[in-house]
Image (cartoon, rainbow, N blue to C red):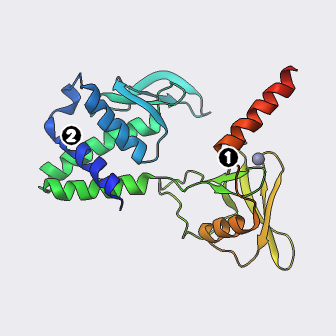
């Protein structure tokens, strides 16, 4: 556990314990909003801000289409998380709402101490962080995890055991693992039909795949090289 996450959890728990009735809290100082923001960010959500507001969920009919009837997702904590693109961040808002509720449940129902609750929030934050994307080619193809029904995140020690091994970042297609030859498997994308990487059959875990890819690929371009490449692409487009 990093010292940083402990500090984030401590500020979060202290803020939550300041108010007993969160559903009645209508205003927070910018410093307090930033405490929420740093907690959701530490939990792996890409967020721009936290502000007052409700996020709505919609009921769906049997065909999966939204129907007009809506309901509020954050009934405990009336503050919502705003995504990088300015839209409501549903999953991060739900996480914030549930985590605020958990702090009070642990305090009132289980009588846990402040220190115990901080330790538990550290665990909640660490468990919420998704698998770090794995770079699989010199063209910067990345594997990111798919969301599992259990809500649990993949970790490097997990086996690549299912047919669907992840999502092709940016493309959004499903990545699948196929046998290619006696000694090699490959990962292909069902969305863009790219053959992304071939690797020895004895690779079992995501961590082993990450390590193997790191050994065979050239290092990713640094920030300056990326910026230079983008500028060149822009130049070529307009002149
Ligand atoms: Zn793809």
- In the figure, 214 relative to 91: above or below? below
Element on which disc 2 rests? helix
Say which residue appears at 74% left-offset and 36% top-offset: 228
Q: Residues within 10 Å of mark 1 (few under 14, many from 20)?
A: some
Where residue 172 sits: x, y (%)?
69, 43
Say which residue appears at 27% left-offset and 41% top-offset: 100
Where residue 8 sits: x, y (%)?
30, 47
Where residue 50 sits: x, y (%)?
37, 29
Q: Which residue corresponds to mark 1? A: 169
Say which residue appears at 46% left-offset and 35% top-offset: 47
Q: Does residue 170 appear in this view?
A: no
Q: Nearer the viewer, residue 229 or 177?
A: 229
The quarter of the displayed image where residue 64 is located: top right
Q: Which mark is residue 60?
A: none
Say which residue appears at 23% left-offset and 22% top-offset: 26
Indicate left or right for 139 with 92 as reference.
Answer: right
Measure the alpha-carbon separation of dots 2 and 1: 35 Å
Indicate left or right for 185 with 92 as reference.
Answer: right
Q: Residues within 10 Å of mark 2 (few under 14, many from 20)?
A: many
The quarter of the displayed image where residue 229 is located: top right
Q: Which residue corresponds to mark 2? A: 16
Q: Does residue 115 appear in this view?
A: yes
Q: Nearer the viewer, residue 232 or 212?
A: 232
Element on which disc 1 rests? loop
């Amino acid at each position: 556990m990093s010292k940083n996450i402990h500090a984030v959890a401590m500020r979060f728990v202290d803020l939550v314990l300041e108010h007993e009735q969160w559903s009645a809290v209508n205003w927070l100082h910018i410093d307090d909003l930033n405490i929420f923001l740093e907690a959701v960010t530490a939990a792996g959500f890409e967020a721009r801000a936290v502000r007052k507001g409700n996020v709505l969920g919609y009921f769906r009919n049997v065909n999966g289409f939204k129907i007009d009837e809506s309901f509020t997702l954050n009934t405990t904590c009336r503050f919502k998380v705003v995504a990088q693109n300015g839209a409501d961040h549903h999953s991060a808002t739900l996480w914030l709402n549930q985590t605020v509720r958990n702090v009070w449940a642990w305090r009132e129902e289980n009588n846990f101490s402040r220190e115990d609750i901080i330790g538990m929030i550290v665990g909640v934050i660490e468990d919420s962080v998704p698998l770090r994307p794995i770079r699989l080619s010199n063209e910067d193809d990345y594997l990111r995890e798919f969301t599992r029904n259990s809500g649990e995140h993949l970790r490097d020690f997990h086996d690549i055991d299912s047919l669907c091994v992840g999502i092709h970042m940016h493309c959004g297609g499903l990545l699948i693992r196929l046998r290619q030859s006696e000694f090699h498997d490959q990962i292909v994308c069902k969305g863009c039909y790219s053959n992304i990487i071939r690797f020895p059959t004895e690779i079992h875990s995501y961590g082993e795949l990450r390590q193997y890819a790191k050994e065979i690929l050239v290092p990713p371009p640094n920030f300056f090289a990326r910026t230079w490449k983008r500028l060149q692409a822009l130049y070529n487009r307009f002149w």
